[in-house]
Image (tube, rainbow, N blue to C red):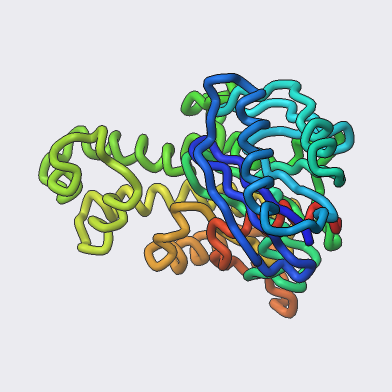
Amino acid sequence: MYIGVDLGGTNIAAAIVDESGVIKKTVSIPTETKGGHASVIQGIISACAELLKDTDETPKSIGIGVPGAVRDDIGMVVFTPNLPLKHVYMAKEISERFGCPVRLGNDANCAALGEVVAGSAKGMKNVTMITLGTGLGGGFIIDGKLHTGLSGSAGELGHMVIFSGGRDCGCGRKGCWESYASATGLKITATQFLEDRKDSLIWELCSGNLEKLNGRIIFDAYRKADPVAVLIVNQYISHLAVGIVNIINLLEPELLCVGGGISDAWDCIEEPLKAAVDSERFARFSDGTAEMKIAKAELGNDAGIIGAAMLGIQ
């Protein structure tokens, strides 16, 4: 028995997972941050205790997917932008409470591992995953194992610059991919288009208030062939394709897996995205006998939990 924990800014989701990546039991509790890092750690402990309350069995390990940088080798959360965790030695306290090893991983890395174990990339050894949510995360599976880098920060694909001197990014740089290809970036792009286009259906769908604007509204308008929405989505896909081509040219994995909230609009972005990538990637000059694929992630929110649990097996 393994436990996987997906630590989010709103909720802590945890599950008992077997060795093949099948979820057996889940719990979810609100993430409490008023007490700083101590409250977050106590929340993880409470979620795990709830999972184990009807069993005397000790988990073989607990894996925690963290929305930020971690040092698994020393059990430390280095930094999380949206939670009060900076240089926090999280693993030791939780390990002592439950009497088992505790592993830490970046949440997008965990999602990538989950898709390899039980999702769209099952059985593959070289996979890149990107997660398109409020931010843009990523994870690398190389030769069947997570690649986390020297300090645990590898896979921060959202902070690859695609426009030198471009939009400000929360990391302090300018022109990061996340600033264009995340849900936040999509909203910024949409707002720029909408300032001079009051005739767009998008205004109606968000009741004339751009504070209510989100990806779902934009893609709903796109499906109705709203001309402004078409321009916005085409621009978004162009931004998304730039980063994906960079990844493919660098690593050329077997599969590039796309997850996160924006992947819910896969019906809108799949074909134009693949066309844009195919027209730009360097491997278009190859003989076509070994073609990599781009696909939507299959596991949804379960990917991170399954992958976190699998950290113990890794």
Residue 249: x and y in percent read 70, 54
Residue 99: x and y in percent read 86, 43
Query: Depth check: 278 or 105 in front?
Result: 105
Image quarter of residue 223: bottom left
Residue at (57% x, 52% y) in the render: 27
Query: Depth check: 77 or 49 in front?
Result: 49
Q: Is residue 30 above or below residue 240?
A: above
Residue 254 visible in the displayed image: no
Image quarter of residue 191: top left
Q: Is residue 37 left or right of residue 301?
A: right
Residue at (68% x, 69% y) in the render: 22
State which quarter of the image contains the N terminus.
bottom right
Q: Is residue 309 above or below residue 266?
A: above
Q: Is residue 16 left or right of residue 170?
A: right
Q: Is residue 136 left or right of residue 121?
A: left
State which quarter of the image contains the C terminus.
bottom right
Residue 227: x and y in percent read 21, 54
Residue 180 visible in the displayed image: yes
